[in-house]
Amino acid sequence: MIALVTLRLGWIGLVSNDLLVQTGTVVVQANVSDPTIEVYYPVPYETPPELTWPNMPYQFGVREQRTDGFKVQFTSGYSGTGLPTWQAKGMRRHR
């Protein structure tokens, strides 16, 4: 099994006044009992954003997606190159 060791935030940017794109990576470690990772977006969205994985060298499933983050569960070992990289795109939350 695998689980989170650290999160790395890659980029936060406004594409327009309200369209927010955030990216990040997760660093995983083998042989941990709970393969579920919870990720919190640094800047929350108005509604759950479009979540994509430009690089995903593991088999996984998104278990929950919210306006402030998501939960992902890795289901098998490493099968590619690089770190799992996510990208979230949606309307930023207004205060």
Image: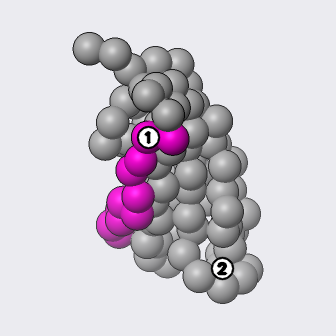
Locate residue 61, reporting x and y percent: 68, 48
Residue 17, can we see it?
Answer: yes
Q: Residue at x 38, y 41 (%)?
A: 41
* Occupied quadrant, residue 89: top right
Q: Please tell me whether residue 46 is drawn above or below residue 26 in the rendered image.
A: above
Give left or right: position of 7 versus 70. left
Identify the element where label 1 is drawn: strand
Marked residue nearer the N-terminal end (2 or 1): 1
Front-lying residue, 68 or 22: 22
Q: Residues within 10 Å of mark 1 (few under 14, many from 20)?
A: some
Q: Read off the residue under disc 1.
A: 14
* Image quadrant occupied by the N terminus: bottom right
Q: Quadrant of residue 7?
A: bottom left
Describe the element under mark 2 as helix, strand or loop. loop
**Range of residues picked out in magenta:** 3-15
The residue that disc 2 covers is 78
Q: Position of residue 19 (x, y in %)?
A: 51, 32
Q: Is residue 72 left or right of residue 34?
A: right
* Foreground of the two, 88 or 60: 88
Residue at the limit of the structure toward the top, as seen here? 95
Query: For the view shown, which residue lies furthest in the front direction?
Result: 16
Question: Can I make out residue 34 in this image?
Answer: no
The amino acid type found where label 1 is placed reads Leu
